[in-house]
Image (cartoon, coloured by chain):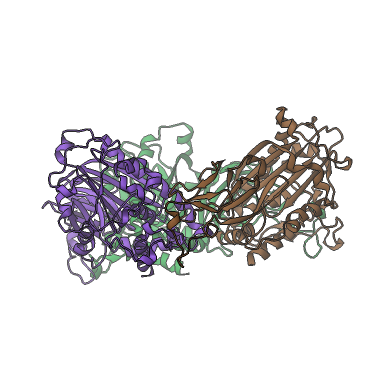
Chain colours: A brown, B purple, C green
């Protein structure tokens, strides 16, 4: 898509005004070894947005999520808090849950040999457990043989997990990124994202590297070419320079536009906390490594990416509304259709780009035009991570 | 499944009574390089049970079998004996047989250039064969340019083949394993396995490493959890300790049980030679690397595994009965259903375990409870073989 | 198939008369690393026959072709000449064309960001193009940022392309090969291949290495075994020695044969320029690395191979006739059926051979009989190329 998430000053140095600068080389997008390094050093080290908390309503509700190369269970505990664990029994390694989501009855019980874990991960029971001892002959520890825990934080209504032994600062890496983009630590709070309800969810299976999807979201140079509906609603996106606006800038709706819908017609009930200067504007934020947040006055569009292979990424997109709008069954089709169409247009472009990444013509990469220069920072960041 | 094939004394050292001991690390179950080493040093070096001899009734009948990474033909010769060859023409390498089984008419003739081999593998004919000479100008040898032979032994009605240049002792490795488990060299002979008829055959395509299937067969700690029908028929399997019984022990049928059937109803005609102390008992034997034999009074269940990839194994399972039972068309459904259901339950468990083998949670493996300790011997043996 | 394309004297040294000589080892046919070396040093270095020019009738008509590992566009320019380019936008790498063939309207326009190229590859337009500068601050070059050109020659009505930085001599490698085989630089001109029309095209997806397909085409030792219809029409093919005839030799039709058809019935209108000594004869030529040409008095059969993987090759086969024959809609079925059946017979043989290439029985390869000895030259050539 279509974003304006560059926190740098709009006034780039004059010397670079029109310069073409190089991108990453093609191997970054198709070499399985680089993808493995990314899994190891990015997706298994950073805070990764895994699941919508409200999807796990009651104790025992779980969702199975692919985080890097690991299968992770996010589970609602008896105390109402979310926990996350590696989805692996400590006895002989069977997956505890093979379904994508569901609800267990009080415990996580391995269906192979019946090792049974509390919802907080502690080993609760196993056949003959009472007689089992560790190498020193002591009774085995319920914690040591409990499920392997994964760090978890809840924010904006989502469970963010981190597989690192020592997770980085959530406040800096996640909250700080959103604040820096919006220019204000409180700006996102106005939308009350955590209290909204999922009105629609679409899952896209994209045959492209995850970085092509991020790069696409970070620039609007393509908007005039592939997003006719979106540029109708947000006319300034048609000039392709959206990304160079100041920190805190949101793209203004067109004069005749009544709402962020496929035909510019009025949307649904506005989110109560949205401020006057946030009204009739579209804000987009990229939270590395796997989240895009799009804010408009009456809904929030929340993308999570799950990188599956160098050339395949699953994208799950939620459209979030004021709960009452969803409960009353209001018609969301015109609202959802706008960004769904943008998604399809964008992912088609990414899939068309993926095959050329292995060409000799792209061995040294392509070029970034000025309105894409901020993608270079992303490239530098990825290259640093991959080098380790 | 469900076995009791540990030939070691039941009384393990007291010090280890309840200890958890480590398994192989997860890479052993998913690393293609380790699988290749296993193909090289285990399946292509040991005696491998390839085919039921009675399936190849008349001269020219053949079966094509995957042994390690090789396609092997087992062929009934004109003299009535079975022979085995690599399924590769010596001229330009075409496969002689592409069907899984069939019957040729007197010779194995390559369909590409018509090089033709006797059923004992010797080169019989080829276009212009009379004028062909070797590098020294001599007439070419019918043996040197014959099919590449594979060692073959028949036992229990099956053809066992070995790809090693110098095959290990069949008497020690195969016959000896069965004798040691049953405590008596003659015990298996009572079942007359070679003279039984195949009443049913089911082929399972299991998305799991072959070792997970063996380990599952070697312990009964899972029986109470996943095999309700089996533990009904064999109550002692419910305690999970089956594997620690003495050499020669067979699990006793439940008191109300009339036969080894899905509902405990009576089976079919008993095998005549079965002794009084073998009656109403179930014996299980693992013959490395690819066979399980299960003995009950009225039938024998014979599993062969064909490892296809680190995460895929084909299992072919024969239910063998007294020939008259099969010829008269007696109803075998209740008899077959019991172990077929056990197979499905077991293979589901193995498939659920396979995906976790690449998790960081299983990098150092899991643990064996006391009733699984004998699996540690299997692990040591595999690790020795893989190290070469 | 079936060829007689050995330009060496028929009288091989007497000492080798009947000798079996070794082939390439099996790894040459299944090792992905060797296939990659072949892509690098053979298919991406030599002249590769890519497309029939007449398929691209008007300016803007294009065909997308896989050449080695690259996607290449062959495009008819406004001046009527064909050009070839890598199918990669110079901006951020999107494929310009994703369809196999089509026609663009005056320009090649990238559907992602609308960078637009003339049909000769020059960068014509892009959003904000006027303000873009290179690293030195100069206006960017329309050529430097044009599509990456691929060398192209037209001959026999086909576009031959070459990805090498310095293409080898087309006259020596392509034209010279045909002349040497036919014994005369003008012999092929009699057939006016460039002016013929495609009467039928069949595309075969063959699960075999490209070299197995070439080797099959180069020898006739298999003809008696698998080509009953062909040997009926060309009786001398039944002796398997076709390949040892003199330079310039064409196989004579059988006495009762009226045309090169499935049943020997008369063909269609003869090609006007065919000479008296070319009449009633079949000539076959292999042009390395990817072309076979078969000449008969009333049509030409033209095979192009596209190697896709070590064990997969796409073969596109054109049957070419005098234009008037095609325009009048004459019945071509009996004519096409003969070589279509030969193709199917040959590709079945190749697919039957591929699986054995990884067998220990073929580790050191197979053997060539005397009538196949010239394949040894091909093997030496491949081995030299792969060694680099």
Residue C279 lies, in percent from the top left, at: 35, 46
Q: Residue furthest right?
A: A276
Residue at the (83%, 49%) spot, across then down: A186
Residue A38 lies, in percent from the top left, at: 61, 60
- Position of A317 compared to B363: left or right? right
Answer above or below: position of B113 versus C17: above
Answer above or below: position of C245 versus B168: above
Q: Is residue B203 visible?
A: yes
Nearer to us in this view, A133 or A374: A133
Residue at the (84%, 37%) spot, across then down: A254
Residue A39 lies, in percent from the top left, at: 60, 58
Residue at the (65%, 50%) spot, across then down: C94
Q: Quadrant of the C terminus of chain B?
A: bottom left
Residue A384 lies, in percent from the top left, at: 68, 65
Tell me the quarter of the picture where residue A283 sits.
Answer: top right
Tell me the quarter of the picture where residue A316 sits.
Answer: top right
- Position of A348 compared to A297: left or right? left
- Position of A268 compared to A366: left or right? right
- Position of B344 compared to A287: left or right? left
Q: Is residue C217 visible?
A: no
């Amino acid at each position: 898509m279509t974003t304006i998430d560059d926190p740098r000053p709009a006034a780039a140095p004059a010397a670079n005004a029109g310069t073409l600068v190089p991108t990453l080389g093609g191997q970054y997008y198709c070499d399985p070894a680089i993808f493995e390094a990314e899994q190891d050093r990015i997706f298994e080290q950073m805070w990764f947005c895994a699941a919508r908390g409200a999807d796990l309503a009651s104790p025992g509700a779980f969702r199975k999520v692919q985080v890097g190369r690991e299968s992770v269970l996010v589970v609602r505990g008896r105390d109402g808090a979310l926990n996350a664990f590696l989805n692996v029994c400590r006895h002989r390694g069977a997956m505890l849950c093979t379904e994508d989501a569901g609800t267990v009855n009080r415990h996580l019980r391995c269906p192979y040999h019946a090792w049974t874990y509390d919802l907080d991960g502690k080993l609760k029971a196993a056949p003959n457990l009472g007689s089992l001892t560790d190498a020193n002959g002591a009774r085995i520890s319920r914690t040591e043989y409990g499920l392997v825990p994964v760090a978890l934080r809840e924010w904006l209504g989502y469970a963010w997990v981190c597989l690192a032994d020592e997770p980085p600062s959530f406040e800096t890496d996640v909250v700080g990124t959103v604040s820096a983009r919006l220019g204000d630590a409180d700006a996102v709070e106005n939308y009350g994202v955590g209290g909204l309800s999922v009105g629609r969810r679409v899952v896209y299976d994209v045959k492209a590297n995850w970085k092509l999807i991020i790069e696409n979201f970070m620039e609007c140079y393509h908007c005039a070419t592939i997003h006719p509906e979106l540029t109708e609603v947000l006319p300034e996106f048609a000039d392709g320079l959206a990304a160079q606006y100041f920190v805190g800038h949101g793209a203004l709706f067109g004069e005749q536009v009544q709402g962020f819908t496929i035909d510019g017609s009025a949307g649904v009930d506005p989110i109560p906390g949205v401020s006057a200067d946030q009204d009739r504007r579209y804000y987009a934020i990229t939270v590395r490594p796997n989240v895009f947040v799009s804010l408009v006055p009456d809904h929030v569009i929340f993308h999570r990416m799950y990188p599956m292979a160098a050339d395949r990424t699953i994208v799950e997109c939620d459209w979030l509304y004021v709960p009452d709008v969803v409960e009353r069954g209001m018609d969301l089709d015109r609202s959802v259709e706008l960004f769904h169409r943008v998604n399809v247009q964008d992912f088609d472009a990414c899939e068309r780009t993926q095959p050329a990444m292995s060409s000799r013509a792209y061995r040294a990469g392509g070029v970034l035009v000025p309105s894409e220069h901020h993608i270079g920072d992303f490239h530098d960041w990825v290259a640093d991570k991959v080098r380790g």
